[in-house]
Amino acid sequence: MNMITNHLPTAELQALDSAHHMHPFTAGAELARKGARIITRAKGVTLTDSDGNQILDAMAGLWCVNIGYGWDSIAEVAARQMRELPYYNTFFQTSHVPVIALSQKLAELAPGDLNHVFYASGGSDANDTNVRLVRHYWAAKGKPTKKTIISRMNAYHGSTMAGASLGGMTGMHAQGGLPIPDIVHIGQPDWYSEGGEMSPEEFGLMRARELEAKIAELGEDNVAAFIAEPIQGAGGVIIPPESYWPEIQKICDAHEILLIADEVICGFGRTGKMFGSLTYDIRPHIMTVAKGLSSGYAPIGASIVCDEVANTVGEAGDFNHGYTYSGHPVSCAVALENLRILEEKKMVENVASVTGPYLKERWEQLADHPLVGEAKIKGFMASLAMTPNKAARAPFEAPKGTVGLIARGHCFGGNLIMRHVGDRMIIAPPLILSRSDVDVLIERAVKALDLTLAEIKDKGLY
Ligand code: PMP
């Protein structure tokens, strides 16, 4: 058999891909008919595909390549670590230098007394850790009935059994017998789609108070924790009304439950501060991190845990939980170098006060487009809600996602990666985006919106 390299024709790579590779969140048969887009290399904010197209990656991969593509020093650090100690585990009272250094660094960066790190290979399995950790914590406190975890509809917390159960995606719950027991969901703070005649602030309070009502319904003695993303990402970049998080924090403070902030997307600068919890003044007991922790250069995730929970669990004997790759030395070394670059190049500041304000200005102007009902942005995560009727914030008559998929096609066709969630278009670009990159992004986005509008008019969808 021929060597499979970048030099094979695209069609051949696509056929081989379809023959042997099962893609996540993909209809395999449909993809086999169409062929996958094959990405061959990337630099900065730009991807190159097997046909030589140069594509602006406004999603930073899967919201993860915060520092952008192509940093040689990361490759060098990874190679050095692989030569020195490619693997050793952190079970059985053993440790190594990269995991010690990264843990110290994360304790320094994380707010409050989040001083203790339990590692995973990504965000999903870090959230699995959280489920077991909070239940184990309450059992260690002599309160074993505190088991239920409250989450939110349309949240995303991963694809493992616990991660997908914590998530509130109906399409995921419908496959594979989810959610697992003792996980319940309250409403999401999506004012645009669900707020009706209420003001955003009233709606935010109303949705936050669903947490209080749910705790009362279940009984505080049965509730272990509330988990939420500071800004829902995969749900469609749902930026909550300003009233939402202060009220949630107040409710968590008033009740004996743990607060878990899932920072897998919001962490490491995406919202204009190091963590979404800092942007919204959230004081979590545990933060889930992944993605921007290594900017995707190596798989790694973690739970960053407060003193009280870590110390209690630490005194309670063995925590019977861990992954072969918990604290993988290469991933830890890569993450450390990634954080060094993030800080040295002042990328979080770029989001907060250099390119961020310009992106905000340009993005919000997209609300003038006839197809856009709302253009919202926080830091470097943003959404466009498309609608046939701006005043009513109405959905399209076509099944949800029909127009979104058309728009995504026109983005791809115009060498811009934007994702669609239903009929919302979303971006989460690398934090190194420059002003001129913003201009290219907006120009391509407008073109894609124009083409989408023309196509849906043609098809009678508008
Ligand atoms: N939590 C959130 C908020 C996420 O956005 C994601 C991934 N999109 C996950 C958890 C799961 O992370 P992973 O895919 O690394 O398992």
Image (cartoon, helix red, strand yellow):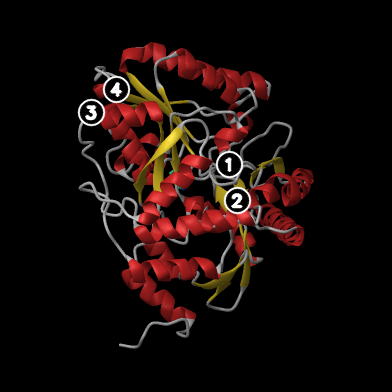
Disc 2 + disc 1, Cβ < 8 Å? yes
- The answer to whether 370 appears left or right of 84 in the picture is right
Mark 2: which amino acid? Answer: Ala
Element under label 1? loop
Kindly tell me whether mark 4's CB lies below 8 Å from ligand 1.
no
Location of mark 3 (residue) = 316
Q: Mark 1 and mark 4: span between their CA atoms?
A: 32 Å
Q: Mark 2 and mark 1: span between their CA atoms?
A: 9 Å
Residue 287 makes an appearance in the image: yes
Q: Residues within 10 Å of mark 3 (few under 14, many from 20)?
A: some
Q: Which label sits in the foreground, 3 or 2?
A: 3
Mark 4: which amino acid? Answer: Trp
Location of mark 4 (residue) = 138
Location of mark 1 (residue) = 237
Q: Residues within 10 Å of mark 2 (few under 14, many from 20)?
A: many
Mark 3: which amino acid? Answer: Ala
Q: Mark 3 and mark 1: span between their CA atoms?
A: 39 Å
Tag 2 or tag 3, which sits nearer the N-term?
3
Q: Which label sits in the foreground, 1 or 4?
A: 4
Q: Which label sits in the foreground, 3 or 1?
A: 3
Q: Quadrant of residue 341?
A: bottom right
